[in-house]
């Protein structure tokens, strides 16, 4: 079996070079890389400091910006980081994101990071950066897929990881072997205090067979016989 390579890249949109934002993004990359290596991945890392692009971000076309986008187009895992400025992400990052064509981030794992100076900035990343992806997938598991649920609930199992079949649906990776998989488009989001609630429009549905896996009162359960 060949060695799997994970291409990781981080984009930092802080006007100050080598800032706290850069340090936070670097730490995210470091931790994910360490975890990936335990699963046998060879990790390749690269960085994009948007301060180096400077005024070229407002030029069109810009060879330097096109080269930066070209590097990002080849990666699997992308960390996008920004300081919180006036309750939003930086104008530097916005100018860069605006030059990405539609669907540019499809098929990539994108992790948004925002660094704030106040607890009031805690929801900024969910409200502002996360919706940029606009699409997400949902997998409904069968009652015999407890190990799969545990794997995605923070108890990773390498055997589960290597045996999970998946396919691309609307440029979103979803499980092939489950009760149902859905590709959704973000419809709206609502502030729920310490949570943000996302409402999605189902674009594609792939139904399977079986009974659903349930989790209730801290235990996995199954639906009983029909009365």
Image (cartoon, helix red, strand yellow):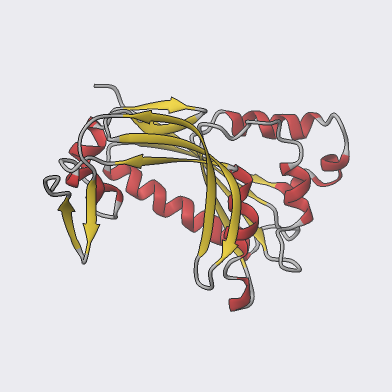
Classify 86 as above or below 177.
below
Q: At 74% across and 58% down in the image, what residue appears?
A: 90
Residue 73 is situated, as x and y percent measured from the top left of the image, at 60, 29
| 104 to the left or right of 219 | right
- Nearer the observer, 107 or 63: 107
Residue 32 is situated, as x and y percent measured from the top left of the image, at 40, 49
Q: At 55% across and 56% down in the image, what residue appears?
A: 25
Residue 40 is situated, as x and y percent measured from the top left of the image, at 28, 37
Classify 185 as above or below 16.
above
Q: At 76% across and 41% down in the image, what residue appears?
A: 98
Identify the residue at the far top of this view: 1
- Nearer the observer, 106 or 2: 106
Classify 52 as above or below 168.
below
Is residue 47 at all visible to an observer of this figure? Answer: no
| 64 to the left or right of 84 | right
Is residue 87 at all visible to an observer of this figure? Answer: yes
Q: At 30% across and 48% down in the image, what residue appears?
A: 152
Classify 225 as above or below 122.
above
């Amino acid at each position: 079996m060949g060695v799997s390579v994970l291409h990781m890249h981080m984009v930092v949109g802080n006007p100050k070079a080598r800032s706290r934002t850069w340090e936070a993004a670097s730490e995210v990359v470091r931790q994910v890389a360490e975890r990936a290596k335990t699963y046998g991945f060879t990790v390749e890392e690269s960085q994009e400091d948007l301060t180096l692009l400077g005024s070229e971000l407002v030029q069109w076309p810009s060879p330097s910006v096109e080269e930066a986008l070209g590097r990002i187009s080849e990666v699997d895992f992308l960390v996008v980081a920004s300081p919180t400025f006036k309750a939003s992400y930086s104008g530097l990052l916005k100018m860069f994101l605006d030059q990405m064509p539609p669907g540019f981030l499809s098929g990539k794992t994108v992790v948004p990071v925002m660094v704030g100076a106040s607890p009031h900035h805690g929801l900024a990343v969910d409200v502002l950066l996360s919706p940029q992806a606009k699409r997400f997938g949902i997998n409904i598991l069968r009652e015999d897929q407890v190990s799969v649920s545990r794997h995605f609930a923070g108890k990773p199992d390498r055997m589960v990881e290597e045996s999970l079949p998946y396919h691309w649906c609307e440029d979103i990776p979803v499980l092939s072997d489950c009760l149902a998989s859905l590709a959704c488009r973000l419809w709206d989001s609502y502030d729920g205090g310490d949570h943000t609630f996302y409402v999605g429009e189902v674009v594609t549905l792939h139904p399977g067979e079986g009974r659903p896996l349930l989790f209730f009162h801290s235990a996995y359960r199954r639906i009983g016989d029909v009365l």
